[in-house]
Image (tube, rainbow, N blue to C red):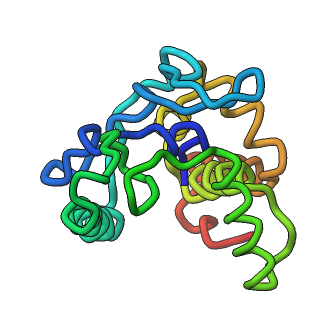
Amino acid sequence: MTVRRSELCGVEIAAFDLLKKIVRMGFTTRVIAGGKVVKGSGKSQKSRRSMALDSFTTGVMVVHFQQIEQYKKDWGDAYQDHGLAFCWEDGRPIHPDTVTEEFNRLVDFLGLPKIRFHDVRHTYATISLRTGVHPKIVSSRLGHATVAFTLDTYTGDVEDLDRDAAEAVIGLFKPRSQKGLA
């Protein structure tokens, strides 16, 4: 998961293009300021970004949006349409703290180690970098202002990246017959 809690709570249905499998994030966020939830326009200019969606997520979102349409029919005039992709059954916006509370309940229910909602972002970034996703792409998907911030934040605990880099570079210079030697 690459989105911030505020982005999740503020993203509108109109931000999704499921045919192209993209979502435009950060144009509308719901943040807590002075104890109240307010609309924002993203943490920074870089947080306002388009991201590709994988096929699984796209399929889930198709079903989710169909469910929202059903809620609109079920609630009729009482539906509070804010255009949000994630809302209560009656269309009311979800408070950002509710996302954290529900996440914590799921973690407890599943008996997982205690992690914060934001830690899922950290995990996504670390796994992406470990699997070889280009740092610029990881930074862009996270909505970071700079690639340097992404690398400083998420590569400190990835020792194998250093080891892989050493082996990759020496692999360019070793004679063919020695490439299999450790």
Tell me if 67 is positioned left or right of 30 in this view: left
Residue at x-position 67% and y-position 57%: 120
Q: Residue furthest top?
A: 45
Q: Locate the N terminus by quadrant.
A: bottom right
The answer to whether residue 55 shows anywhere in this view is no
Q: Nearer the viewer, residue 67 or 16?
A: 67
Residue at x-position 58% and y-position 37%: 6
Tell me if 127 is positioned left or right of 116 in this view: left
**Residue 77 locus on image (x, y percent):** 23, 52
With respect to residue 146, does 73 lie above or below?
below
Q: Nearer the viewer, residue 65 or 170?
A: 65
With respect to residue 108, does 57 lie above or below?
above
**Residue 181 locus on image (x, y percent):** 70, 71
Q: Residue furthest front?
A: 77
The answer to whether residue 129 shows anywhere in this view is yes
Residue at x-position 68% and y-position 65%: 102
Quadrant in which residue 32 is drawn: top right
Quadrant in which residue 110 is drawn: bottom right
Q: Nearer the viewer, residue 35 or 123?
A: 35
Tell me if 137 is positioned left or right of 158 in this view: left
**Residue 97 locus on image (x, y percent):** 70, 48
**Residue 114 locus on image (x, y percent):** 86, 68
Q: Residue furthest bottom?
A: 110
Residue at x-position 56% and y-position 47%: 172
